[in-house]
Amino acid sequence: MPPTVGSAPRPQRWMHAPPLPPLQALSASLLDLTALAHHTPPQQMLHDALHLLQRLVPFDSAWWGEVSAGSAHAAPRNWLHGSIGLSQRFAQEWNALAAGDEFARMSMERLGEVICENGPDAPGAIPPELEAFCRRHGLCHCMAITVELPGSGMMFFVSVYRPPQGPPFSGLEAELFGEFVAHLLCHWRHALQRLQALPSAHPWDGHALAEPDGNLLYVGLRLGQALHHAHPQWSGPALPAALHAGLCKLPGTMALGKSTRLRFEACGPLVLISLVVRQPGSAQPPSQSPLAPRELGAATLYAHGHSYKDIALALGLSPATVRTYLRSAYGLLGVRNKVELVSALRK
């Protein structure tokens, strides 16, 4: 019965929704993550996923992306990154200090394990430049996980931070963080596979995915090293400005140094960039297949029984373009039917 005029409103049982127990909160977050992975463009997926994580495990700032481990001759390096609450120069500053970052080294050595470091280091425990870097960006309580990104030569990491006035990360938060990122990585790998449609015989280390404005979504280690060799000042996460012209005329190629070229092809709303290394005195790139990556992707899917419509949907192309790719693949491989195509692709 509604209250009479002038009477006091009935009190609400909950002014805010009560916090969910940890298992329910994790379940709800993973369901939201699955929906996000299916309906969000890949170029936005990681950023939105980290905001979902922030509801599950509150943090002040976060950093994620691709990194390569160090060696006797080179320090660890970040190649691609996104962030929440950090400056645009964060990755570039870290690359200059990476050799002394023991927290990052530990995370890269203990793949798949959540690493926590709560509270500031004791004075003198880390290099002064790194200590100043942490103070400048409010990196007091840190939690990270690094995992291998198969076939790419890279590792994928997620790091979250709280400032000195924030609470330390708890053991329960570390468990929730680890479970969420494991599911995120699974969705991310599936998104890359759908976009690239490359068989396992052609690893991802020589490919990259970029938005039309040059922002990189993914880069393999060989291609990243080639970019850095040709453009030493390049630090990501966008393609070097000198190569932006290749994004405008698809498909097409551009020189990257004396013996290397990059191939640019449409990949739905994105651009697939492939590394083509020519050996001295050779007119053809050393490759296991004469097909371009998109031709190979379409031919592989067709050989596995997918229809033109399915292939077009998977690769972000029109059915007519798929037919063009398949005609080209048949001609280059010298085959006349699907049975011969399957045999040729197995060689």
Image: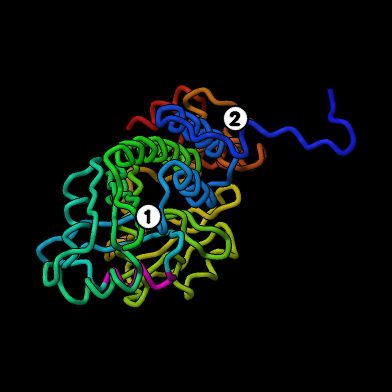
Foreground pick, 30 / 261: 30
Callout 1–callout 2 Cβ contact below 8 Å: no
Return the residue at label 1.
65
For label 1, the SS is strand
Looking at the rendered structure, the kind of residue marked 1 is: Gly
Residue 14 located within the stretch drawn in magenta: no
From this viewpoint, is residue 332 visible?
A: no
Q: Going by the picture, which residue comes out furthest to the right? A: 5
Q: Residue at x 37, y 73 (%)?
A: 234
The image quarter in which residue 122 lies: bottom left
Q: Position of residue 193 (x, y in %)?
A: 44, 39
For label 2, the SS is helix
Q: Position of residue 239 (x, y in %)?
A: 45, 67
Return the residue at label 2.
310
Label 1 Cα crowd, 10 Å radius (few <14 / some 14-19 / many 20+)? many
Foreground pick, 118 / 205: 118
Q: Is residue 106 above or below residue 304?
A: below
